[in-house]
Image (cartoon, grey):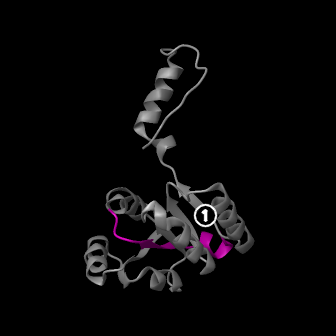
């Protein structure tokens, strides 16, 4: 993140009107004084308008228009996983920082390529992984700290 961005709010645009974004991420963004929800894009302007009115931001028709906007510093990508690679790359090409829902991209090669592109442009690219902060993870830590589990040799978790 550039020095100028550290001195002001990061203006975030959201690609799509997903329930995940509405339920968790947008309220979290709005609770942060460092973040300004600048806009939400949808392929359907009417849907974007309903979402934007709900969260007090600009409605934008089309994902490309959002990522091309000079009023956006970073883009949150809660699109279906099959669309992540294309839209993350387009965000990077437009000079935008990216927060993308899991799974980031389908292959290691795609991940390496996009990470290399972000690094070359001085952009942040982050996969949204909340599990380390989830209450269930905290419970597991508490059980371990209290010695209620015994010696841990392997801990495996699956999200599906």
* Quadrant (top left/top right/bottom left/bottom right) for the N terminus: bottom right
Image coords of residue 64 (percent x, y): 48, 83
Residue 82, placed above or below residue 57: above
Q: Nearer the viewer, residue 73 or 68?
A: 68
In the picture, measured across the screen, residue 56 lies left or right of residue 116, that is left
Query: Image point 49% across, 34% down: which residue?
Result: 157
Q: Which residue is labeled 1 in the image?
A: 125
The part of the chain drawn in magenta is 1-18
Query: Image point 40% across, 59% down: which residue?
Result: 25
> Which quadrant of the view contains residue 94?
bottom right
> Is residue 34 shown to the viewer in this render?
no
In the picture, measured across the screen, residue 106 lies left or right of residue 56, that is right
> Is residue 46 shown to the viewer in this render?
yes
In the picture, measured across the screen, residue 114 lies left or right of residue 158, that is right
* Quadrant (top left/top right/bottom left/bottom right) for the C terminus: top left
Is 93 in the magenta?
Answer: no
In the picture, measured across the screen, residue 151 lies left or right of residue 31, that is right
Query: Image point 61% across, 56% down: which residue?
Result: 107
Q: Nearer the viewer, residue 8 or 42?
A: 42
Image coords of residue 29 (percent x, y): 43, 63
As helix, strand or loop, the secondary structure at mark 1 comes to: strand
Residue 153, placed above or below residue 109: above
How many numbered marks appear? 1
> Which quadrant of the view contains residue 55?
bottom left
Is 2 in the magenta?
Answer: yes
Image coords of residue 44 (percent x, y): 31, 81
User: Going by the picture, which residue comes out furthest to the right?
Assistant: 120
Query: Image point 69% across, 60% down: which residue?
Result: 112
């Amino acid at each position: 993140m550039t020095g100028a961005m550290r001195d002001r709010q990061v203006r975030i645009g959201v690609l799509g009107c997903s329930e995940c974004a509405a339920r968790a991420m947008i309220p979290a963004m709005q609770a942060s004084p460092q973040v300004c929800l600048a806009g939400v894009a949808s392929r359907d302007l009417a849907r974007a308008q309903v979402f934007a009115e709900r969260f007090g931001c600009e409605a934008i028709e089309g994902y490309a228009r959002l990522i091309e906007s000079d009023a956006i510093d970073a883009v949150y990508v809660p699109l279906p996983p099959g669309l992540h690679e294309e839209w993350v790359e387009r965000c990077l090409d437009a000079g935008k920082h990216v927060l993308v829902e899991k799974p980031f991209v389908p292959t290691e090669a795609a991940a390496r390529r996009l990470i290399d592109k972000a690094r070359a442009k001085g952009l942040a690219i982050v996969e949204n992984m909340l599990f380390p902060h989830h209450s269930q993870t905290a419970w597991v830590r508490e059980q371990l700290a209290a010695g209620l589990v015994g010696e841990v040799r392997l801990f495996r978790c699956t999200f599906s």
